[in-house]
Image: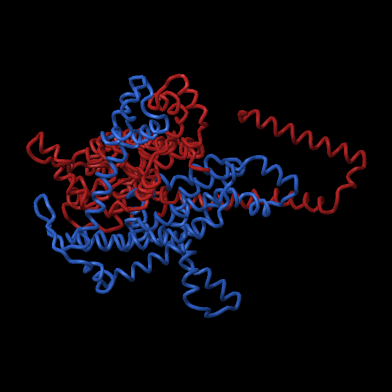
Amino acid sequence: MATKKEEKRFEKEMKAAKKAKIKAMKEAGISLNITPEQKRYNRQKAIVGAVWPIFRFFILFGLCFIILYPLIFMISTAFRPDAEMNDPSIVWIPKTLTLENVKQTWEVMKYGSTVLNTIKLNLVASVLQVITCAITGYGFARFNFKGKGLMFGLVVLMIIVPPQITTIPLYLQYSYFNPLGLVKLFTGDTVSLINSGLTMYLPALFANGLRAGLFILIFRQFFRGLPKELEDAAYLDGCGPLKTFIVVMVPNAASSFLTVFLFSVVWYWNDYYVSSSFFNQNDTVALMLKNLTTTLQVELFNNQTVGPRQMIVWLESGCILAITPILVMYVFLQKYFTEGIERSGLVG
Amino acid sequence: MTNTENVVTTPTKEEVKALKPPKGVKQKGLKIPYERRKALYGYAFIALWLIGTIYFFILPLFESLIYSFNETHPQRGVMQLDWNGLGHYRDAFRKDQYYSQYLVEILGSTALKTPLIIIFSIFVAVILNQKFRGRTFARAVFFLPVIIATGPVIEIINGNMDTGGYSGGSEQFSTLFETDLVDQLLEFLGIYNISESLTNTITTVTSDIFNLVWNSGIQILLFLAALQNIPFSAKEAAQMEGATAWEYFWKITMPYISPMILASLVYTVIDSFVDPENKVMKLILTQGSDWNYGYMSAMAWAYFLIVGVALAIIVAIINKFVYYEVG
């Protein structure tokens, strides 16, 4: 891989060489040999090359504006006093800036402890999920066994079936947790996992976490793309399959691991479905944000009605608080989101 | 070699028994043929997932299927069931005033939205794949929806901009994208009163640019990855032959990204059907919070089956047009 600098220099040299060539041809009078089709083609290309960048700029600018609009709106409203929401002379830039809303929302959301709790749940589940999905994906990619097609069909089914279908039975399973009667055997009674982080960790540990099917698919595709010789060499040197996987395959899959991990983190962070189904006290950021309207009513406004317009100030502060951690992560690791996926072998 | 021994013992006893060589043959070391041993390793690698899937996925799935045929009465620790046969399904389609209507609406809007999202994301991906200044920034912005749109944030933003927006801001924004441009354009062209539904369709499309852009993050990502996998030799050959950008797009780009079109089509359709904000999903979830689990499961299963069939048909059709590179 050439570095960017080298690429640039190479391009420059190419252009210079082309120019010199054309000049030499003109001097030698060969330019007459260009057929009319070639001329037309060149002219067309030149016109497109001159006009297209301008169009492209406007298209991208407009679309970027649409995407960034809510964020601008968020920043504009979150830091203004709520009274200024009704001031018709203010559209974007508030007259006074205040941190009061953010502070109040912070307290209502119990932000500090909520964030720590979310990060804990999130990281443990994501790490477990990445590891187990990689192992499963490798199993599907490189081994032939009876029923493989059927089981892979199960993976696809996991992607397609909406989690809402299985929620109620799962809730029962969790609240009277007793797989194969083992728990009852040891503790004498079933255990309730509701509100415990285990409702996230356990499925993740068994490669059944959020969107696990998709991750298994990504890993399978990736491992299938690696050359078989790698493993054969390892086998010849006396590695067992597990050791081969850990020593040879995992280091090769590093970028794919990172991509899956990042997506997993994002999805766990944004998830309020699992948390709202299986938690009622164990707070995550997404859940807090989802319930922000009601908690604000009860805790901040003492059940007095507040106009929907003023309400926006606090809601948008909540949004800012909720997305800041994930946004910071995105800014620093943006490269791995956008470039990781092509190396992760989702393609081809 | 301790590792390998550990792995071998993980499969169930019956499997190991079945694979043991007949008695009398005594060999040191390789007792199980290589291929079978590899198969066992395969089982070992997916064992964890298989256990998890049976417990966290298959069992609940069947349970909910059973619920859908029963009247459910939640008791402590168990769900009391009274057999109801296909009653819930019949109710959902015949008695429920919203279910069938919403179902048709969702199918229609998905059929409309999906091709748009696909075309739009191919377009954006092609642009983002070109070289220009600020490309990194543009890419970062376009993938931002992937980070935000899956969470509750986007709902709040949407809600705030729809309902409680200050005069000016939100309306300005919505009129910016919801003007009846199409109608005006048609009138300008002298076309009046062509079928109402056509104008409605076009208007819903043009008014929904915001959702279109916000729902295409993953698809753009997929197409961009596919575009970067087009071998350089193909591009070079096309340039040598004097292909215009238009020809290049249809004859080189499209075939190479066609597998990804299938993938993102499936993703888009599923995403649209499974979205907890869509009307059918909301209907199903309301039944859940009203403790009508039997009815809820019946609705969910019927919905899921319809989605599955629709998806299967789409995949079967599209798959005929997909170009797979031999190699």
Q: Is residue A5 left or right of residue A259?
A: right
How many marks the image carries: the answer is 0
In the depicted view, which residue is nearer to us: B297 or A72?
Answer: B297
Q: Is residue B74 left or right of residue B221?
A: left
The quarter of the displayed image where residue A189 is located: top left
The percent position of residue B244, horizontal first and vertical second, equals 71, 52
Residue that appears at 52% across and 52% down: B261
In the depicted view, which residue is nearer to us: A289 or B83?
Answer: B83
Residue B150 visible in rendering: no
Q: Say which chain is blue.
A: B
Q: Is residue B244 left or right of residue B134?
A: right
In the depicted view, which residue is nearer to us: A192 or A142?
Answer: A142
* Residue extending farthest left: A188
Q: Is residue A273 left or right of residue B233?
A: left
Name above or below for residue A140 compared with residue B320. above
* Residue extending farthest front: B24
